[in-house]
């Protein structure tokens, strides 16, 4: 594996899953591979879990980790051929090449505009970094995907599943702000290779991009979707059709104990941070079927497996 | 010792003092204990000394140290049962549990509101972190205490004292802004177990909270208080009674050479940062009896002793 | 070498150059010297290259590196004898002494006001840190010099030069903002000891400070200056005479392929970040004669040589 930006970058995802599980049993058992290697983590948006879990993964591997907050004081130009006489101080072409001089691996966190669908779905910032960097790139969430989250989610489902092929339901949930589709897109991408029975439920108008959702059963009735579910994965996202918009939704899509009662005693999952009593009721997230903290914990081992696989080929 | 948030967390404070002094003689002599351990430092307010001295202490112990500036881009909800539909993106209950997945110890820096006395004096943010985290918590200054500072102050007094039971005077001093009472509260808390003759002096209206000050002699005449003093510890704080207010004070409470001349050639102490010629005159802070830089230096060994004691029980 | 703030701090610059070249061949070959040593990097301005390359250099030497962003939440007072009752919370005298307690070396990045020429050219912030710190100081760019950049530039010229004494031309270039003179000043300072034939070219009114430029041939006709050049070093700077101003300049001073065609197939250099098609045309910076990424790469080895030489004397 060279880059890690989407599922198709991974030659053998099931082997990566196995690696992550092995690492979880002994997180500091492979420190020779990271010695004298440096990972630079570049954040164009604030991050808690991704920042700390990825740094922790690097430290477990005995790597040096340099975290750079790119959201302040440094605006990048992404257009080719432009006369740079406004406020953008550096072109991506130099920035990516320069950081590559100091890093063995670069991690990048970007965010969608939620305005320009075409640009967001070309994943322009990530792809330009990838183009102009001379070292492997790990996506720490891009405009449209969050593969480290999905790998951690998969590890978690494998850990807790109580039958060979559990029913996993991705449910839309309310949120006061317009959010990206990245976590949901990636979850669908990865769950299609997992041994699960996958279903999506959301209000009409919240259909995800066909490149991620096509072929996956969609049920507009949330309560019906929850029937027999073994895992409920809740997430808000803004509309893909009316791009980046929050639509008027009258129904209450909050995940409540009543709705969970319709499931097969399902586990509750969310990538966090979560708005309590908007996305999910206190009783659900605090129940012993809530996996949100385990998911966060598995972020470390997902990142560590990815970094380790990349280091093996350096 | 599990947590370190106040004096009563420390089973044997004198032993902790001894440890700090031993560490000062050989700061890198105990690196096995920190190997593959991670401390996460979480700052809800800017910090120079605490940030760098605690990171230095962790590095001396061969730990990994992850510093997270929580003051930007991430607002926590602390109320239970609330519907999180405003600007607070994550509940303390998840945040503390999540960070616990990545840290062996969490250090937290919080600040009082200086508006809501009851809430500040319940030390709500610190206590909720403590409640919801699954790992030990070190206070890097809370709404009402700053125990690492007080331990460093105690180390410093022990280093420089010229008699068995020196007279130590905590004096209020002027300041252009309303400041917390944390440093002063903690200083009183810790000095009561130190072998010193403790006195407080401040203008009327600046009485500290009874839970910290009761039983300690208070002298409203600063010059009288300074008589025979061996250590002058200057600090501004806002009013506890008229909570968080700066009161009209006509007298000049700046610590001057003239006032120091009334002491028993006392040492001058302050936790820094200090407003020169407001809190203390240049001549005093620059004199060879000024201990402010030694206090700052001892912050490292205070933090290191605390971390080391906590690691011993992990 | 104790401090590293300007050329005259370096006892033997040619030996330092040799060291940097040796380090480049084996960046992690000397880790014993940095063990248990700490460098604190203090940034009063945002920095990408300097921040990451210096941290990388420290990590290559097995040092601990603590990065502190001093641009937020912490205003320093630099005047002596002042009554500190405004917004400046700490005096440089304490700040420098305190950080010295935690650091074996302090790196500092400051910036000119571009308003007060006399103050800027006294390099007040850097010099006060140097005065009040008790440990060696490395300039990570000051108001008027950027010696780590110049050392990296020198390494780069030595690496690529195709004749014993190449012609090196420092050319002014346009920019939408008023920029410091630091990079240009330092470049002139260091190039005078390099084995090069140095020339400056800029529009009238952009004469650099005599302390840096006197004795160096200046050619106001850029095209003429480029003739027979082996290295073109482009940089914008604001006026020294009309201090900190951008003057009305009608001519187009952008470095274009047409102008480069007048040179002796010269290499193109710039310290980055660079405004494409303002300072330099895309075709020039993307050509195989562009050394900008090599310059950035050599920043690590310049910093590492400097840190290593300082550590040798600690």
Image (cartoon, coloured by chain):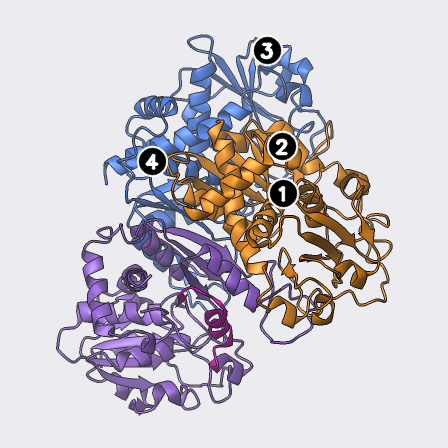
Chain colours: A purple, B blue, C orange
Residue B142 visible in the snapshot: no
Q: Same chain for marks 4 and 1? A: no
Q: Same chain for marks 3 and 1? A: no
Q: CA distance from mark 2 to mark 3?
A: 45 Å
Q: Same chain for marks 4 and 2? A: no
Q: Which residue is mark 1?
A: C147
Q: Which residue is mark 3?
A: B263
Q: CA distance from mark 4 to mark 1?
A: 34 Å
Q: CB under 8 Å between callouts 4 and 2?
A: no
Q: Which residue is mark 4?
A: B61
Label 4 vs label 2, nearer the camera: 2
Coordinates of residue C143 in the picture (x, y in percent):
70, 44
Q: Chain of mark 3?
A: B
Q: Chain of mark 2?
A: C
Tell me what residue is drawn at x 26 percent, y 67 percent. A290
Coordinates of residue A58 in the picture (x, y in percent):
34, 54
Residue A84 magenta: no
Q: Chain of mark 1?
A: C
């Amino acid at each position: 594996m060279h880059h890690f930006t989407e599922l198709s970058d991974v030659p053998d995802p099931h082997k990566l899953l196995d690696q992550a599980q092995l690492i979880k049993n002994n997180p500091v058992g492979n420190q020779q591979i990271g010695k004298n290697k440096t990972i630079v983590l570049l954040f164009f948006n604030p991050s808690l879990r991704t920042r700390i879990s990825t740094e922790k993964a690097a430290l477990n591997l005995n790597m040096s980790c340099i975290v750079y907050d790119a959201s302040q004081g440094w605006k990048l130009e992404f257009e080719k051929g432009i006369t740079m006489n406004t406020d953008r101080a550096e072109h991506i072409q130099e920035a990516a090449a320069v950081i590559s001089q100091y890093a063995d691996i670069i991690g990048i966190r970007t965010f969608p505009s939620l305005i320009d669908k075409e640009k967001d779905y070309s994943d322009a910032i990530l792809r330009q970094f990838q183009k102009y960097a001379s070292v492997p790139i790990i996506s720490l969430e891009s405009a449209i995907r969050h593969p480290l989250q999905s790998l951690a989610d998969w590890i978690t489902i494998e850990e807790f599943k109580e039958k060979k092929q559990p029913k996993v339901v991705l449910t839309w949930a309310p949120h006061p702000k317009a959010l990206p589709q990245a976590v949901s897109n990636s979850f669908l991408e990865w769950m299609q290779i997992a041994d699960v029975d996958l279903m999506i439920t959301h209000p009409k108008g919240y259909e995800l991009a066909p490149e991620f959702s096509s072929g996956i059963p969609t049920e507009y009735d949330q309560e019906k979707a929850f029937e027999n579910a073994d895992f409920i994965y809740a997430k808000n996202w803004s509309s893909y059709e009316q791009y980046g918009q929050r639509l008027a939704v009258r129904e209450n899509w909050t995940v409540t104990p009543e709705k969970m009662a319709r499931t097969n005693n399902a586990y509750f999952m969310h990538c966090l941070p979560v708005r309590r009593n908007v996305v999910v009721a206190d009783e659900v997230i605090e129940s012993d079927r809530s996996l949100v903290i385990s998911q966060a914990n598995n972020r470390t081992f997902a990142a560590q497996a990815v970094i380790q696989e990349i280091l093996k080929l350096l």
